[in-house]
């Protein structure tokens, strides 16, 4: 989520306690348990094959989507998969709790494995921005969960598949920060202590997009250097804020932070562990929001996705460290006419996966290239639905390719949900996707090459009724694709 408060004070403290997470099975709260176990009932089914631009093509073998309900409410979900093939999910749940959920059987059943205090209460405080990230690199395999409290952040990590946790109650770079991203990778020059990789924590403080780093696996954090982005843009003579997408570290230790900056898609790259940054404009076709996503493949090719001014999802690739970028490819599923909240991951060379919220029946642009009135709409507050969006429905799309570097890459797109049972109704962005989905969704490619995505089903009650005109419910949903390997 977002905040308008800023601060300049840096805090770094040692871990406060080691706690044990007692697993408890989650019920499906009224949903068909067999559907939750099978992961097929209610899913979107077979993917469609297409080129960039949306032209469909025939392929005899197509991946299929599967859908799992985690059994708890959700908002702003993130997902991760360990080398042991365990899937973890965390999201805003209610106004009294946030839980870490684990599935040890490919989504069939979920249990609560949150960090706990000796008295059984959650070690992590109630948060506006829960976030999970799993470092699955060799020698690491550590699970991180971090909760933003506005005043700072609570971070816990586990090295034994969430059986025990170490908790750090002050894991922030400044005393007040927002819209955080936690990620990591190999060091460039700094010696690490007790852990092989550097853990980075970047956040929005309105004035900048700033970062801190931990050289001891999340126990203490230190300022990196200059911000990845400054809020004010001298050339544009405007303040473009500090909101950004999720960060990433490549195999060489280079750090990436993407964002829509002053109306254009950018990525900031640091080659010295965040001491200095260089900003690269990815394209000139514009961007509809701050949320973007970036990753690299084993050969160092950079992939980045964003939502263009036509509100469709785009992908661009750089083969020379961000100096030049390919022509943007519109990679949306055929029929999608509006999208939001893109999330990307990369596996093997040329193997990429993107998740996004998409609609096939939004009002779209008029003949003048204008969108329906967005009065009161911003990245911070949810856009008012407006009567134009009364019956607009949204699905969760996963789009993948195994040959994204070719001249004519083939993409496969599937919805995590059955289109007859949408996961959102009304307006979804630009900016926040309503008051239940919020600021982002998530997608990762597991170590075994399987794609996993995290969603919110905001249509569990009223949206099954075609006469409904607003959100209803907010259930946590996890999606995956079978029949394709991206490693």
Image (cartoon, grey):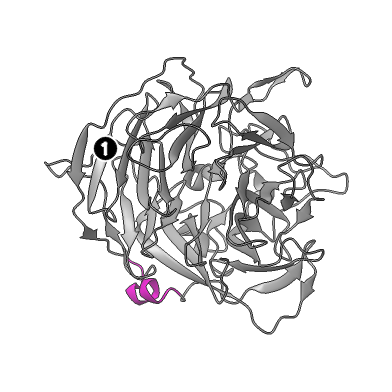
Q: Residue furthest left?
A: 119
**In the displayed structure, would residue 106 be above or below residue 10?**
below
- 214 to the left or right of 425: left
- Which percent across, then down, holds residue 118? 12, 42
Q: Which quarter shows the C terminus?
A: bottom right
Q: Does residue 399 show up?
A: yes
- Which percent across, then down, holds residue 315? 72, 52
Q: Is mark 1 on a helix, strand or loop?
A: strand
Q: Which residue lies furthest to the top in this view?
A: 8
Residue in the picture at 36% in, 42% down: 195
Which residue is labeled 1 in the image? Answer: 167
2 in magenta: no
Residue in the picture at 34% in, 44% down: 94
Q: Residue furthest bottom?
A: 60
Q: What stretch is highlighted in magenta?
A: 30-39
Residue in the picture at 71% in, 73% down: 49
- Which percent across, then down, holds residue 270? 61, 33
């Amino acid at each position: 989520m977002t905040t308008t408060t800023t601060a300049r004070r840096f805090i770094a403290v040692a871990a406060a306690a080691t706690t044990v997470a007692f697993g408890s099975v989650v019920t499906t709260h009224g949903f068909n348990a067999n559907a939750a176990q099978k992961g097929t009932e209610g899913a979107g089914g077979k993917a469609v094959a297409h080129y960039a631009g949306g032209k469909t093509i025939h392929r005899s073998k197509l991946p299929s989507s599967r859908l799992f309900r985690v059994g708890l409410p959700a908002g702003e979900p993130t997902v991760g998969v360990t080398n042991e093939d365990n899937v973890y999910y965390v999201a805003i749940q209610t106004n009294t709790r946030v839980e870490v959920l684990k599935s040890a059987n490919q989504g069939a059943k979920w249990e609560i494995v949150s960090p706990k205090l000796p008295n059984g209460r959650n070690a992590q405080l109630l948060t506006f921005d829960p976030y999970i990230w799993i470092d699955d690199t060799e020698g690491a395999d550590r699970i991180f969960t971090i909760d933003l409290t506005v005043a700072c952040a609570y971070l816990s990590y586990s090295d034994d598949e969430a059986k025990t946790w170490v908790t750090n109650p002050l894991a922030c770079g400044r005393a007040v920060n927002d819209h955080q991203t936690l990620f990591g990778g190999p060091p460039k020059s700094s010696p690490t202590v007790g852990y092989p990789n550097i853990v980075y924590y970047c956040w929005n403080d309105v004035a900048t997009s700033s970062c801190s780093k931990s050289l001891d696996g999340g126990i203490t954090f230190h300022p990196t250097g200059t911000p990845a982005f400054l809020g004010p843009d001298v050339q544009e003579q405007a303040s473009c804020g500090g909101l950004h997408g999720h960060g990433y570290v490549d195999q060489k230790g280079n750090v990436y932070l993407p964002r829509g900056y002053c109306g254009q898609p950018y990525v900031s790259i640091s080659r010295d562990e965040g001491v200095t940054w260089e900003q690269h404009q990815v394209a000139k076709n514009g961007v509809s929001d701050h949320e973007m996503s970036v990753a690299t493949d084993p050969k160092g090719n950079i992939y980045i996705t964003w939502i263009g001014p036509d509100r469709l999802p785009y992908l661009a690739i750089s083969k020379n460290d961000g100096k030049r970028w390919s022509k943007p490819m519109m990679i949306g599923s055929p029929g999608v006419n509006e999208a939001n909240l893109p999330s990307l991951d990369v596996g093997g060379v040329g193997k990429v996966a993107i998740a996004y919220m998409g609609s096939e029946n939004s009002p779209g642009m008029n003949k003048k290239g204008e969108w329906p009135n967005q009065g009161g709409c911003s990245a911070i507050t949810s856009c008012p639905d407006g009567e134009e969006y009364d019956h607009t429905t949204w699905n969760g799309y996963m789009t993948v390719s195994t040959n994204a570097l070719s001249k004519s890459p083939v993409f496969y797109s599937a919805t995590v949900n059955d289109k007859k049972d949408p996961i959102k109704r009304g307006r979804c962005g630009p900016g926040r996707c309503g008051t239940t989905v919020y600021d982002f969704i998530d997608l990762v490619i597991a170590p075994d090459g399987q794609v996993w995505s995290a969603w919110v089903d905001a249509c569990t009650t009223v949206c099954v009724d075609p006469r409904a005109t607003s959100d209803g419910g907010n259930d946590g949903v996890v999606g995956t694709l079978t029949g394709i390997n991206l490693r």
